[in-house]
Image: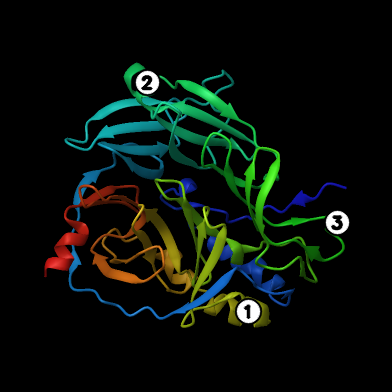
Amino acid sequence: MPRKNYHTIHETNMMRLKRNAFLHIIPCMLFLSIYSCSRHEGYNPDAKHTISRVQTTVDTLSGYPLGELVPDIHRIEIRGDYLIVLSGNREALFSIFRTSDYSLVSSFGAIGHAANEFTSIPIDFNFGEDDKGNTVIYAQESPSHIKIIDFEKSIEKGTCIICGESKPTANTTSRSKTYQLSDDMFFARNDVGYDDPRDGILYPPTYKITSYDKLVKEWKPYGGKVTTKVPNIVMGKYDSRIRISPDRTKAVEAMLCTDIIHVFDFKAKTMDSYIDNSGYDFEWFDNEVNENNFLRKSRIYNVGVSVTDNYILIIRDGRLAIEFEEDMNEESPTHISISDWGCSDVKDIVVHENLRELAYDENNDILYGLSVNGKIYKYEEFIKTVQKR
């Protein structure tokens, strides 16, 4: 019998981020308290590293407001001289702005059923190059269907130019997040599944590198199964944000409700875990059995993520989930942690604005941040400014 996949109610991965993106977190906690008496078989990535985050903030930076470039922004990204915005606009999912003056250069990608349209907002996307070196967008329409967009031609024509499609099968379930790494290589996280919802056994997330229908590498860091008295619940403790490095040789996964970072090296085929012992880990969820304590103590750790080939930038919080959800103040400060790919701290920076999503332009040292209310801010000389002081 094929394994069904479990739907996470508050699955608000950053590409689904809206202005009120985290309003589902507290209902999720109610479900999680039912689950909390469950047990893992173990947590075993390839390597575990304990890290101690020492705040090295030198100053607080203020952003230059670019305003609400388009309504209902889900994700922002940088590619060359362009700021890419993925939104909920059914007529143009992708809006491309020139970073020299932030004028709208092009918009494309409608909701529909034509070959160059999408049946829904892409689950996520990452950039790549075709065999001629042209920039493409790998847009995940479904876990087993990736549409490949010719980036430059779509900008030039003002319409979505599909130059290919990929249909990986070995790495997907109905709740997978699938990222294309090259013409025939993929990375996927398969979400929580079950065989029979009545038997109290759930299968936690797995991670895979595949080549279409061939399995290259698989990780099962959470063990083979999770037992619970109530299987039909939300496994929010596994919620995370995934980003692929521009050179597509690495990926980072930042866990939302535990203070854990996963780094995948696709060349070495390794999965390293970086755990801050001052925060919650998976064992905390397993040991907490009191519903009131759970709701009172649950925290949000890693919110938004941006990566370059050299840096990992993460919006770090640590507040109680209730406090985090209620904070819609545009001027609440945001703590951004900058590290290398070994999770060694480079800098900690605080900005004046309440951000939920990041996009870092390393070539020009400019950070773009999407605020809790859908506004975009620009921070020039982002790392350099702090290093000089």
Q: Residue beneath label 2, please?
A: 153
Q: Residue beneath label 3, please?
A: 196
Residue located at (29% from left, 42% from top)? 68
Q: Position of residue 63 (x, y in %)?
A: 20, 55
Identify the mark nearer the N-term, 3 or 1.
Answer: 3
Element type where label 3 sits in the image:
loop
Say if residue 255 shows up in the picture. Answer: no
Residue located at (29% from left, 69% from top)? 346
Query: Mark 1, residues whose alpha carbon is within 10 Å: few (<14), some, or many (≥20)?
Result: some
Identify the mark nearer the N-term, 2 or 1.
Answer: 2
Residue type, numbered disc 3: Asp
Q: Nearer the viewer, mark 2 or mark 1?
A: 2
Q: Give residue 231's quadrant in the image.
A: bottom right
Q: Which mark is residue 210?
A: none
Q: Quadrant of the C terminus?
A: bottom left
Element type where label 2 sits in the image:
helix
Residue 137 is left or right of residue 143, and the answer is: left
Identify the mark nearer the N-term, 2 or 3.
Answer: 2
Q: Position of residue 249 (x, y in %)?
A: 47, 50
Query: Mark 2, residues whose alpha carbon is within 10 Å: few (<14), some, or many (≥20)?
Result: some
Do callouts 3 and 1 mark residues in contact (Cβ within 8 Å)?
no
Residue type, numbered disc 2: Lys
Foreground residue, 283 or 132? Answer: 132
Q: Residue furthest front?
A: 268
Element type where label 1 sits in the image:
helix
Q: Which mark is residue 283?
A: 1
Residue type, numbered disc 1: Glu
